[in-house]
């Protein structure tokens, strides 16, 4: 049988090996025969018609095989569409390829991993994408925006009234500049200000089932800035998916009427804020986001110029049935999430914001990192904000600003740094009605901070834990002494100091004093008591311990009053059981003529054992504390002091 082996009739290892050897030899013979025929064809002059039919392929059969594969999958290679004379950009050949797909009823266009020059200088240059077209840019570099430097701007790609479109694996490099022109123009049947057309990919009309995946977009230099990567000019858009996007040099990366969207894994840095001189603050995402899910968004690094007036990473301008989750913002001068306009039945969760710097916004009373705009109770309702952490460092700004009606703010944490001087509220409850708020406010500084204020808010359940040193909180009034957002009524504010002083509350108008309820739970919830101790490393002649108190608010009207009753049990002890002193006090703190003062403190019980120790107290109404001291004249036997304090009642 020559080189082919006789495999016999036994199905054993030799049979299998011989069979595989025969298959291999047959394939070698087939390829050799094919090569012989190919050489004969190549070596023999062929009719020009046959040569032309080969195109870019060596043999006509190779091109026919490629055509069969493309017909089977409706896949076209960009390499099959070359520039023609006198074309100098890649726009015409891309349009020819897309036209070919459109004629075939749709399909896939695959680019080479190369560089493509796409300077769109008029509406005709814009590449419009028909329905049922998928483009795999295959990691290609697409240079866009060149020539658009201060003149009229046009889209690079337009998806208008089309369905089932996808872009993937594209690397855009913007070579133009930001358009600051505010003149109104009509292009593509859309009338907008010129800056709106400073957009790379535009969506319009009744588009549906559009996907963008694995896209990057950067400026060629820090001077090459653009407005939007993807902007929707339609409020009727259907299903939209945007995933795995990295970008820089943008003003509003994903912008305007984005609805019915799944947005995941978006990364941004070097956002510029030139937009603030034209139409408003910059953002990573600025959109309506109705019926949408936004997840895993990161924005970091430095802002690229004009920090004044910067917006948040996400500004939701009218959300409904939407979840915004896992947002992480450390970009300089930027907040994380701001809700503006109508917002209904949506969740904002798992947010972390700690701006790298706040050069322009430091000490700004109106800036907050996460929250909603004020005076919008009617249009903002049934929202859930949960698991929100804002580290405001030492910028003296507000971390969280609540708002709306029938909403929940759960597990809100606001922190300041060791060097902070926080005179603006760390938490602001403003124009918030019939909502539930649970927060923890942590001041790491030795300076007193303003934990929170309440204004124009009614019927809320507010529960706050504090750590650190705080001023007494107030309802917010403007410089003219007028309630900034109206009176607050019917709120129940429960406060618990985990460490540091009890914050307390000053209702600045008797209408509010009569209507709102303040409850201090700074002592153990079950026993309403807390223990304070000071134990000396070695015995001494004196030992003291300071207890923070919840002083009542100052009296602002003859119709308003406030009283808190405390009990203190004080135990001083020496180095052995022969030196013990115990006293029990009852104290009443009530409004004085101006500021709160202790009006009565009585000793209820006094027990001593052995050599007597002296117990005394000092009241500090400024810092709202009482200090207990144990002494023994002329001796150094004292070891420590314990104080147990409980709230008996308050009115």
Image: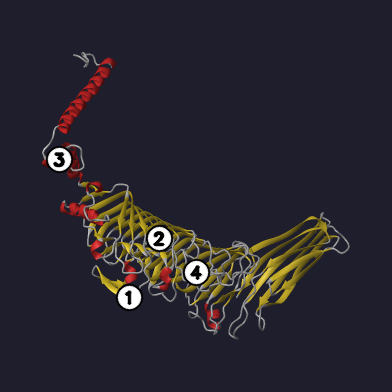
Q: CA distance from mark 4 to mark 3?
A: 70 Å
Q: Earlier in the sequence, mark 3 or mark 1?
A: 3
State the CA–CA distance, disc 1 to disc 2.
34 Å
- Residue in front for this viewpoint, 146 or 348: 146
Chain-order first, disc 4 or disc 3: 3
Q: Nearer the viewer, mark 1 or mark 2?
A: 1
Quarter holding residue 85: bottom left
Q: Which residue is mark 4?
A: 368
Mark 1 or 4 closer to N-term?
1
Label 2 sits on a secondary structure element that is: strand
Q: CA distance from mark 4 to mark 2?
A: 18 Å
Q: Which residue is mark 3?
A: 51
Q: Is residue 567 above or below residue 127?
A: below
Residue 183, numbered label: 1
Q: CA distance from mark 1 to mark 4?
A: 32 Å
Other-residue count near label 3 (Cα within 10 Å), few / some / many at <14 / 14–19 / ≥20: some
In the image, is residue 434 above or below residue 261? below
């Amino acid at each position: 049988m020559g080189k082919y082996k006789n495999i016999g009739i036994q199905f054993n290892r030799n049979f299998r090996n011989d069979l595989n050897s025969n298959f291999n030899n047959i394939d070698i013979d087939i390829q050799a025969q094919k090569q012989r025929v190919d050489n004969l064809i190549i070596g023999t002059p062929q009719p020009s018609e046959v040569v032309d039919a080969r195109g870019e392929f060596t043999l006509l059969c190779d091109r026919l095989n490629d055509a069969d594969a493309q017909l089977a999958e409706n896949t076209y290679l960009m390499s099959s569409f070359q520039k023609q004379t006198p074309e100098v950009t890649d726009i015409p050949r891309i349009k020819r390829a897309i036209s070919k797909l459109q004629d075939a009823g749709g399909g896939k266009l695959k680019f080479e991993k190369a560089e493509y020059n796409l300077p769109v200088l008029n509406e005709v240059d814009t590449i419009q994408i028909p329905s049922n077209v998928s483009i795999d840019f295959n990691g290609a570099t697409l240079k866009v925006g060149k020539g658009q430097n201060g003149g009229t701007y046009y889209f690079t790609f337009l998806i208008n009234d089309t369905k089932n479109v996808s872009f993937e694996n594209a690397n855009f490099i913007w070579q133009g500049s930001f358009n600051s022109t505010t003149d109104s123009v009509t292009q593509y049947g859309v009338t907008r200000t010129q800056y709106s057309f400073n957009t790379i990919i535009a969506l319009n009309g009744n588009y549906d089932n559009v996907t963008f995946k694995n896209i990057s977009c950067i400026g060629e230099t820090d001077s090459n800035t653009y407005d939007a990567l993807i902007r929707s000019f339609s409020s009727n858009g259907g299903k939209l998916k945007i995933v795995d996007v990295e970008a820089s040099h943008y003003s509003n990366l994903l912008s305007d009427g984005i609805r019915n969207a799944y947005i995941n894994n978006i990364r941004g840095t070097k956002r510029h804020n030139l937009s603030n001189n034209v139409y408003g603050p910059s953002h990573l995402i600025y959109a309506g986001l109705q019926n949408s899910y936004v997840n895993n968004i990161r924005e970091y690094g430095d802002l690229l110029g004009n920090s004044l007036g910067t917006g948040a990473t996400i500004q939701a301008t009218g959300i409904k049935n939407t979840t915004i989750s896992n947002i992480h913002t450390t970009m300089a001068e930027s907040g994380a999430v701001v809700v503006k306009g109508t917002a209904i039945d949506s969740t904002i969760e798992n947010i972390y914001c700690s701006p790298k710097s706040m050069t322009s916004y430091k000490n700004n009373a109106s800036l907050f990192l996460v929250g909603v705009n004020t005076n919008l109770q009617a249009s903002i309702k049934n929202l859930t904000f949960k698991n929100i952490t804002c580290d405001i460092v030492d910028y003296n700004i507000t971390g969280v600003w609540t708002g709306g009606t029938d909403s929940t703010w759960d597990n809100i944490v606001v922190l300041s740094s060791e060097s902070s001087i926080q005179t603006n509220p760390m938490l602001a409850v403003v124009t918030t009605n019939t909502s539930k708020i649970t927060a923890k406010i942590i001041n790491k500084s030795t300076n007193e901070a303003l934990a929170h204020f309440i204004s124009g808010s009614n019927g809320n359940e507010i529960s706050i834990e504090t750590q650190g040193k705080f001023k007494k909180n107030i309802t917010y009034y403007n410089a003219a002494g007028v309630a900034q957002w109206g009176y607050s009524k019917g709120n129940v504010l429960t406060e618990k100091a985990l460490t540091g002083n009890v914050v307390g509350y000053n209702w600045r108008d008797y209408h509010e004093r009569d209507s709102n309820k303040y409850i201090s739970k700074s002592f153990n919830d079950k026993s309403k008591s807390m223990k304070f101790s000071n134990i000396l490393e070695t015995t001494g002649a004196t030992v003291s311990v300071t207890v923070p108190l919840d002083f009542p608010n100052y009296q602002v009207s003859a119709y308003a009053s406030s009283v808190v009753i405390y009990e203190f049990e004080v135990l001083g002890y020496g180095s052995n059981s022969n030196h013990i002193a115990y006293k029990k006090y009852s104290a009443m703190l009530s409004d004085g003529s101006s500021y709160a003062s202790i009006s009565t403190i009585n000793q209820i019980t006094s027990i001593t054992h052995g050599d007597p120790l002296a117990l005394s107290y000092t009241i500090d109404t400024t810092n709202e504390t009482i200090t207990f001291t144990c002494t023994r004249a002329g001796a150094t036997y004292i070891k420590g002091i314990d104080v147990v304090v409980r709230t008996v009642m308050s009115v």
